[in-house]
Image (tube, rainbow, N blue to C red):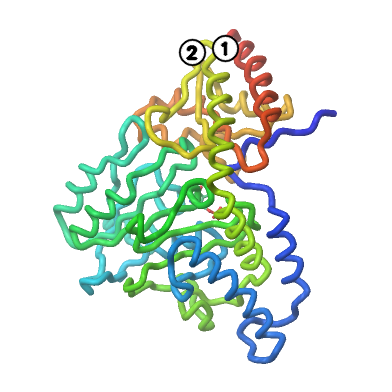
């Protein structure tokens, strides 16, 4: 039987060998990192090494890294009324872009009547004029935008948004879950006051994430209260093995970024050209800068659900727009926000590549697409 082809890297990635080794070493340790004996100190060292690695990789100070159970939890932690920047005035409302991950759209601890939504263009890029307009009217806001969209791959104008947000006395949170390891991301260059990361998108284990806070940002309200772990910002005994795996994955992902991104972009372009060769196929957000690994496409009369199953039967793992915990395909809120009709949004299929994707994987995916595209479109 031919090997499976995995093209769903934006949903999750395989564990890197370096992360696996770091985790296995961590599992051998007995200690609780909060214990002061030698066993505890040994576990603490793994946690602090990973913290330093992540901090260096994204241009932050280790003390400003808070490990969480996921990107989802880091987003929930970030969206905290009472956050204060250099002005000392707490944010009183939240503005999120319409294409954010569900964990940001949920709004964290902000009440529903204090949450506003930022429009995006037809290409899936946030509308900076709308950000300006929303900020010009009302108290200081926390603005949350993603660095790169998980469905379309469209890169967002984070640094420009930061200038606007700071000019209006607000703070900027950036969900960088899909950006880490695919494009350069440093919190200072981007102007982020808070940034979210998740290990399983970069070859680390599932179930570990981090919120990184810029120096001088105060007032973060913990979601989980109890012990004083993570400098009182996230209670609960640290997931030592998960954190060690995260640290190892970040180190490799950031070191290999330039080479991996170039390789993926070349393969992605080949894939995209082949997709377009089937009549009527179109790629979303192809007129703006995108992640080097992502293609979201559709074709007239196309049904994502049928296509995902069709690809799967051909041995190729792909996804409909957004990965969905129920396994059911929902119309994509991202494509709806971009102004596409729900029938178009229901036909969107995402192929996302990773560091070990080979030219042969792309050829197999294209073979499957030609077969499927021709039958589905005829049928
Ligand atoms: N933010 C974005 C942009 C994502 O793509 C994801 C995962 O799909 C998350 C946040 C959530 O991360 P996690 O799966 O670690 O909860």
Q: Where is residue 315 in the image (x, y as percent from the top left)?
A: 74, 29
Residue occupying the far top of the picture = 378
- Which of the two residues, 83 or 253, is positioned nearer the viewer here? 253
Q: Could you say which disc has been placed on residue 377 in the image? A: 1
Mark 1 closeness class: few <14, some 14–19, many ≥20 residues within 10 Å:
some
Asked if the residues shown at circle 1 and circle 2 are in contact, with their CB atoms under 8 angstroms apart, the answer is yes
Q: Is residue 103 at least partly visible in the picture? A: yes
Considering only vertical position in the picture, is 366 above or below 23?
A: above
Q: Could you say which disc has been placed on residue 254 in the image? A: none
Considering only vertical position in the picture, is 240 above or below 303?
A: below
Q: Position of residue 201 (x, y in %)?
A: 58, 50
Q: Residue at x 32, y 56 (%)?
A: 112
* Mark 1 to mark 2 CA distance (whole Å): 9 Å
Observer-side mark, 1 or 2, equals 2
Q: Is residue 333 at least partly visible in the picture? A: no
Q: Position of residue 14 (x, y in %)?
A: 68, 48
**Residue at the disc numbered 2:** 280
The mark total stands at 2
Element under disc 2 = loop
Q: Position of residue 203 (x, y in %)?
A: 64, 52
Q: Residue at x 61, y 85 (%)?
A: 34
Q: Which residue is drawn at 44% across and 72% down?
A: 61
Residue occupying the far right of the picture = 1
Element under disc 1 = helix
Considering only vertical position in the picture, is 5 above or below 157?
A: above
- Which of the two residues, 287 or 168, is positioned nearer the viewer here? 287
């Amino acid at each position: 039987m031919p090997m499976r082809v995995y093209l769903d890297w934006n949903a999750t990635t395989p564990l890197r060998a370096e992360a696996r080794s770091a985790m296995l070493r961590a599992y051998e340790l007995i200690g609780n990192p909060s214990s002061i004996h030698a066993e505890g100190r040994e576990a603490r060292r793994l946690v602090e090494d990973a913290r330093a690695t992540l901090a260096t990789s994204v241009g932050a100070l280790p003390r400003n890294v808070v490990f969480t159970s996921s990107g989802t939890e880091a987003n929930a932690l970030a969206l905290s009324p009472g956050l204060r920047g250099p002005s000392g005035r707490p944010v009183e409302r939240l503005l999120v872009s319409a294409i954010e991950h569900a964990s940001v759209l949920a709004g964290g601890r902000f009440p529903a009547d204090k949450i506003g939504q930022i429009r995006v263009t037809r290409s899936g890029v946030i509308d900076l004029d709308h950000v300006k307009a929303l900020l010009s009217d009302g108290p200081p806001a926390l603005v949350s935008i993603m660095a790169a969209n998980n469905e379309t791959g469209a890169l967002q104008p984070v640094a420009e948004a930061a200038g606007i947000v700071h000019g209006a006395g607000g703070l900027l949170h950036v969900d960088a879950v899909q950006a880490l390891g695919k494009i350069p991301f440093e919190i200072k260059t981007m102007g982020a006051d808070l940034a979210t990361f998740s290990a399983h998108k970069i070859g680390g284990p599932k179930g570990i994430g981090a919120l990184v806070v810029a120096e001088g940002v105060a007032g973060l309200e913990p979601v989980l209260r109890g012990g004083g772990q993570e400098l009182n910002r996230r209670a609960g005994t640290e997931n030592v093995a998960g954190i060690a795996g995260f640290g190892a994955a970040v180190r490799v992902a950031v070191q290999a970024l330039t080479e991996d991104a170039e390789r993926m972009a070349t393969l992605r372009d080949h894939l995209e050209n082949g997709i377009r060769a089937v009549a009527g196929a179109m790629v979303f957000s192809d007129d703006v800068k995108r992640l080097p690994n992502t293609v979201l496409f559709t074709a007239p009369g196309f049904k994502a659900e049928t296509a995902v199953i069709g690809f799967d039967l051909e041995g190729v793992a792909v996804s409909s727009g957004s990965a969905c915990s129920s396994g059911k395909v929902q119309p994509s809120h991202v494509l709806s926000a971009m102004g596409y009709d729900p029938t178009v949004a229901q036909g969107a299929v995402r192929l996302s590549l990773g560091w070990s994707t080979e030219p042969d994987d792309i050829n197999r995916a294209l073979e499957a697409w030609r077969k499927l595209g021709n039958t589905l479109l005829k049928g």
